[in-house]
Image (cartoon, rainbow, N blue to C red):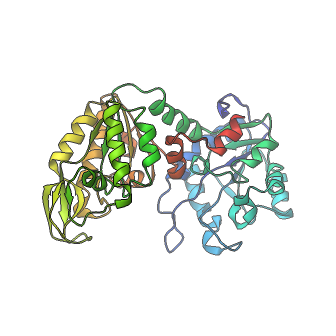
Amino acid sequence: MKTIDNYNFSGKKALIRVDFNVPLDADFKVTDDTRIVAAVPTIKKVLKDGGAVILMSHLGRPKNGSEEKFSLKHIVKKVAEITNHKILFAPDCMGEKTAKMVANLKAGEILLLENLRFYNQETKGDLSFSEKLSTYGDVYVNDAFGTAHRAHASTTIVAQFFPNDKMFGYLIEKEIKSVAKVLNDSKKPVTAIVGGAKVSSKIIIIENLLNKVDNLIIGGGMAYTFIKAQGGKIGSSLVENDFIETAKEILAKAKAKNVALLLPQDSVVANDFNNDAEQQVCATNSIPDGWMGMDIGEKAIQDFSKCILNSKTILWNGPVGVFEMKNFENGTLKIAEAIVAATKKGAFSLVGGGDSVAAINKFNLAEQVSHVSTGGGAMLEYLEGKELPGIMAVMN
């Protein structure tokens, strides 16, 4: 794997693909700067060597060219604050003015280009658009794991114009090594916690994980499809009836592969999907009609926590309850705390995939696990065993 560690950027202009697709509030203030913070070590390495930095990213999903609400100018102040460095901003990612700003860029300076997706050539992976981007740098660095599963111009196609000078930044390097540690180089016992709403979105991951793990904990809305597959009564809980047979197959495969598959013994149930609904605790396989599972109960917390604490490698993908609601966050919080405790005992813990990242950030525990992935879709596809175009473009 070619990384920036063994490259000297002195006198070089580094074209770095970062993932600054960060959430903004109504006043265009950044509400979660995780992805910006994650890019800092790579940026600092280039500057320390005596190089110049050209940052390129997308923000949101603009439909018709330039859209004010998706302009990267809104994040310039935050990037400057986090990097502790002045940020120059190019009000376009193409054109003569941008080319001139790049040409005048001096060692030690940082230039942020405007949103790449203001051009549909970016998402189409257009060759001539990629070639124009490539003229900005002497070296290409991909440090945007969150977009590595897309064969876009800036994430994949541009790499071919740097046959000998393309590499991964520190963030992608860490992401690749972390997933490899879980899938290929794990210390046993290995436990995967898979949660979230739907079985359908996690089938391939679960089937891939069954070949790698000793324990598979299933929580969240998807657990009720498995409970129903076992003949349990789940009331009004979320269920995918089309995937009952799939759930049965997964249960059978786990048994055949000697993987302990843990489902929640008990659930916190409510008579409506809102924070202030009436609630009670009952066995997950006998939920009364008109009631729905919203969180795992104390018995499930104890079962799951015991399994996690006895693990040496842990993957967490998806919450085990409706953690966004204060009254139904306890199960997800307790799982996060168990992962932190296991990490302190020496386990390697990887948290990845949208909502589990949101959860660990909500509980302010991100610093206490081994690695929190910045790539939602990319992380999921990597766990499914797929080759990511953004990774392969730099590897090959």
Left or right side of 210 for 141: right
Which residue lies at the image location 58% right of the left edge and 50% below the top edge?
83
Q: Quadrant of residue 240?
A: bottom left
Q: Nearer the viewer, residue 72 or 192?
A: 192
Q: Is residue 253 positioned above or below 74 on the image? A: above
Q: Is residue 195 positioned above or below 59 on the image? A: above
Q: Is residue 58 positioned above or below 251 on the image? A: below
Which residue lies at the image location 49% right of the left edge and 35% below the top edge?
178
The image shows residue 143 at horizontal and vertical percentages of 62, 44
Q: Which of 392 and 236 is in front in this view?
A: 236
Left or right side of 188 for 147: right
The image shows residue 124 at horizontal and vertical percentages of 73, 59
- Specify whether residue 260 is in view: yes
The image shows residue 167 at horizontal and vertical percentages of 69, 37
The image shows residue 381 at horizontal and vertical percentages of 53, 46
Q: Which of 271 and 335 is in front in this view?
A: 271
Left or right side of 305 for 5: right
Q: In which quarter of the image is residue 94?
A: bottom right
Left or right side of 262 for 390: right
- Specify whether residue 115 is in view: no
- Label count reads 0
Q: Outermost residue, front direction?
A: 245
Quadrant in which the N terminus is drawn: top right
